[in-house]
Image (spheres, rainbow, N blue to C red):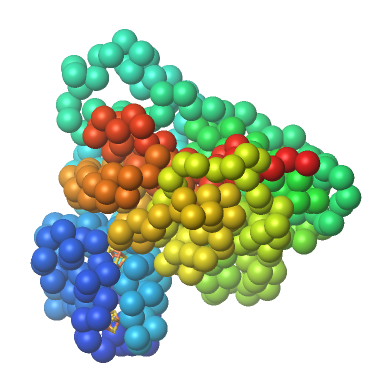
Amino acid sequence: MNTHAPEQFLDEDKSLACIHCGLCLSSCPTYLETGNENNSPRGRIYLMRALQQGRQPLGDATVHHIDLCLGCRACEVACPSGVQYGHLLEHTRDHIEKHHSRSTFQTFLRRVAIEKVFPFPTRMKLALLPARAVKLLHAENFLPKFAREALSLIPDNPSAGKLPEISPAFGEKRGTVGFISGCVMSVMFGDTNRASVKLLNRAGYDVVTPPAQGCCGALHAHSGRLELARDAARVNIAVFEQHNVDAIIINAAGCGSTLKEYENLLHHDPQWLDRAQKFSGKVKDLTEWLAKDLDANKPATPFKTKVTYHDACHLAHAQRITKQPRDLVKAIAGENFVELTESDVCCGSAGTYNLTEPEMAERLGNRKTENILKTGAQIVVTSNPGCLLQIQAGLRKAGASNVKAMHIADFLEEFSQHP
Ligand code: SF4
Ligand code: SF4
């Protein structure tokens, strides 16, 4: 247990913005599940300040309350005082990872799986091979519970595949956009990436997918490894500076919020700040870009299926994008669109949270599945790979084979009219 007074890791002004009103509590998934103030935004900000001031030791109990935070940022939307909770959390996690000793298992998960495997598509593909073999042989029951839970997240038929560097617009060209193919997206959702590029081509854009792009850094930033996240940001900024694009499109909400925050990440680096601002200014979620032309998204045939929509936290809370994806889904589903109760309560995926905090992830996953089933929808649409994996696993576990979870790009590509 570390009890010495720590170096300054928390932005004091940002932490003092919290006026302890408690209006964020009812939006916090971990507070909803536990009723424990220490698992609420207000309680966690109090703990962060106590850590900073040396009033609280950096022990397992305190770290657990911070670890249990999903980083979903629902509290930011609810906060009348404009508290930048995500910023406070990332810097507190950075401090924890530098000064707190974790168990061997947690250290392996964080330093090896999350840092050295997931951000590298080739390594992730290799790591998936034994997992897929276990699934094919139906040998899951020989594994411990945490491994079974992790395995249940892997789709039966992941689709990988690289995108061409240039994918030309279909018909009349309206512009050129860059595309971020993502780590998890390019290994498990290659078909979704191809659908995303086709939607952009059909909307009149040449799509440039630079092969030299790397991980966006979200996994590092969210797990308290800010220097690694900054390195990832510098790589992507330099890569996209070589291309003259109108926008940089991303179809994974978790990556999108980090890409839009490169300027915050590189705030203290004068050599990169201006370049980071230019890069982040161009980043658009796929739905933000496509919703500019709703007329292009009409159903190919009369659409009779009931559809609902789950808000990915990093789209709804971090980027405040809730209307555009709904508009796109409704353009196809019309009156068959039905709202999902607690649509913006985290599904428990939260990046790699379902690996590091499987128990809470399972509770939130069950809560999400129950709400989806109550809608009576046969399709649930979302816009982030983590949510998709978590929701698909929850539906499989509930035996709800009649309900399909789809990424919004796949939904639009499958059901919209193609000229
Ligand atoms: S980020 Fe999400 S889980 Fe964490 S305190 Fe805020 S609302 Fe709660
Ligand atoms: S709503 Fe904002 S100001 Fe109020 S307790 Fe929560 S974080 Fe603090």
Left or right: 382 in relation to 211: left
Report the front residue among 8 and 75.
75
**Looking at the image, residue 161 lies above or below residue 57:** above
Which residue is at 21% across, 39% downward?
A: 104
Farthest right residue?
172
Q: Residue 11: horizontal and vertical position, in percent? A: 37, 80
Which residue is at 30% across, 33% downward?
A: 400
**Looking at the image, residue 366 lies above or below residue 35:** above
Report the front residue among 190 and 299.
299
**Looking at the image, residue 68 lies above or below residue 270:** above
Is residue 65 visible in the rendered image? The answer is: no
Quarter of the image where the C terminus is located: top right
Which residue is at 63% across, 66% downward?
A: 280
Report the front residue among 332 and 383.
332
Which residue is at 11% across, 67% downward?
A: 36
Instruction: Give the image quarter of residue 405.
Output: top left
Left or right: 212 in relation to 382: right
Q: Residue 359: horizontal and vertical position, in percent? A: 18, 45
Which of the four quarters of the rendered structure image does ligand 2 lie in?
bottom left
Q: Residue 37: horizontal and vertical position, in percent? A: 13, 71
Q: How many marks?
A: 0
Is residue 160 visible in the rendered image? The answer is: yes
Q: Residue 323: horizontal and vertical position, in percent? A: 52, 66
Quarter of the image where the N terminus is located: bottom left
Report the front residue among 17 and 335.
335
Instruction: Give the image quarter of residue 90.
Output: bottom left
